Amino acid sequence: MEGRAAARAIDALRRGWPVTVSAADGALRLMAVEGADAVTLAAFDPDGAADILISATRAATLKLTNQRAAADPDQPVMIARTPWIDAGVAMAIADPVRDLGSPMKGPFATAPLPAPLAAAAALRLARLAGILPAFLIAKDEGESEVDVSAAAIDAYDDAGRLAIATRARLPVAAAENAEIVAFRSPEEPREHVALIIGRPDGRPPVVRLHSECLTGDVLESLKCDCGPQLHEALHRIADAPWGILLYLRQEGRGIGLVNKLRAYALQDQGFDTVDANVRLGFAIDARDFSVAARMLKLLGVGEVRLLTNNPQKVAGLEAAGIAVAERLPIILPANPHNERYLATKRDRTGHQL
Ligand SMILES: Nc1nc2c(ncn2[C@@H]2O[C@H](COP(=O)(O)OP(=O)(O)OP(=O)(O)O)[C@@H](O)[C@H]2O)c(=O)[nH]1
Ligand SMILES: [Zn+2]
């Protein structure tokens, strides 16, 4: 039931419908700034009284840093509503990509945050919904059709209920003897898959955790290294006695396609991949590799030889109970478009390149 509440809340936010998020310290009736237009906003907030909740990093960009809670610098910040803040201004407050186009924002004043835990849960829900972490918060608690608790939000992408849905033979260019296994959880619509190549030979399989990248995997984007890494991984696995490629639906390191493309727009303005994520109000890497661990366990695999340059993937898998017998680097030549991205991975996120 909890998972259902989070799924309904995600759906409602994306449609501009109200949601009540509750936590130990209270409840907030809110709507996504991204879902607000003149009509949905008037329905939610006829008096124009709703304040605006933003992330701590967004508050810093908007020069509201001195108003952040000293005890918790990551605590979300509430902007007091003024008559000139309409849906368009709210979106300019929320979206850092628009900063160059509308630099003269404010002055803004902050308002007290009635339920900091509920506010923080709402920002976590934004990531799951793939929307900007910014909400209009109603003055009264009122009634929403959709209620979601902080616990339900945190349980949403818990891999615990992931199960094998089906499997089939899938000859691919890298290997004719491959089998695809699809995984589903009752809560989450995104289906992860594993491609198993070869037969177990008693040794740990060569495994690649590949996070979805629509632009790199499908469109052969030159901005990142995902497409070539995917192909290299498939061939390396095909050359091994056996191995598994996990295709994880964690687009944009877990922030979703639209937010990743917002990060790209910020990169066009000069920010690197790390700063772009932070500026949007997200973690540098929002992925949870316990999903991958659960998939491996369901396939009967407890130990792997992991194709990665990212020590955090090794640590994430091991923390989730999968032994990493060996880390196998996967290093490919840079191109002029992804040179800076790769350098940032090396210098700022600890990739061993
Ligand atoms: N947010 C964000 N995500 C990006 C960006 N560039 C690529 N990605 C995402 O990063 C993920 C690719 O990461 P991986 O190649 O799986 O992992 P990694 O952390 O680079 O580690 P390796 O295993 O060494 O490749 C995909 O989900 C991409 O969509 C970016 O600039 N911003
Ligand atoms: Zn990519």
Image: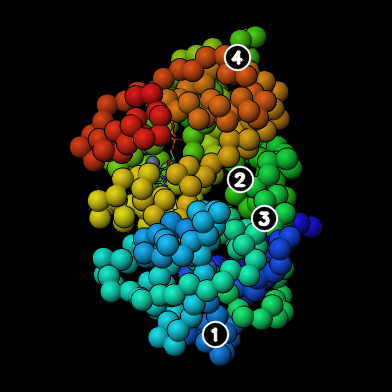
SS of the residue under disc 3: helix
In three-dimensional space, the C-alpha distance between marks 4 and 3, rounded to whole angstroms, equals 35 Å
Q: Which mark is residue 74?
A: none
Amino acid at dot 2: Glu
Of the numbered discs 2 and 3, the one sitting upstream in the chain is 3
Say if 165 sits above or below 262 in the image: above
- Count neighbours of disc 2 (C-alpha within 10 A) and say few if under 14, some if 14 to 19, many if 20 or more: some
Residue at 33% over, 62% down = 97
Q: Is mark 3 within 8 Å of ligand 1?
A: no
Residue that sits furthest to the top in the current view: 202
Q: Which mark is residue 191?
A: 2
- Count neighbours of disc 3 (C-alpha within 10 A) and say few if under 14, some if 14 to 19, many if 20 or more: many
- Taking 156 as reference, is 55 left or right? left
SS of the residue under disc 1: loop
Residue at 73% over, 60% down = 24
Contact, CB < 8 Å: mark 4 with mark 2?
no
Residue that sits furthest to the right in the current view: 1
Amino acid at dot 3: Ile
Amino acid at dot 4: Pro
SS of the residue under disc 2: loop
In three-dimensional space, the C-alpha distance between marks 1 and 4, rounded to whole angstroms, equals 59 Å
Q: Nearer the viewer, mark 1 or mark 4?
A: 1
Q: Which mark is residue 49?
A: 1
Amino acid at dot 1: Ala
Q: Is mark 1 within 8 Å of ligand 1?
A: no
Q: Which residue is mark 4?
A: 204
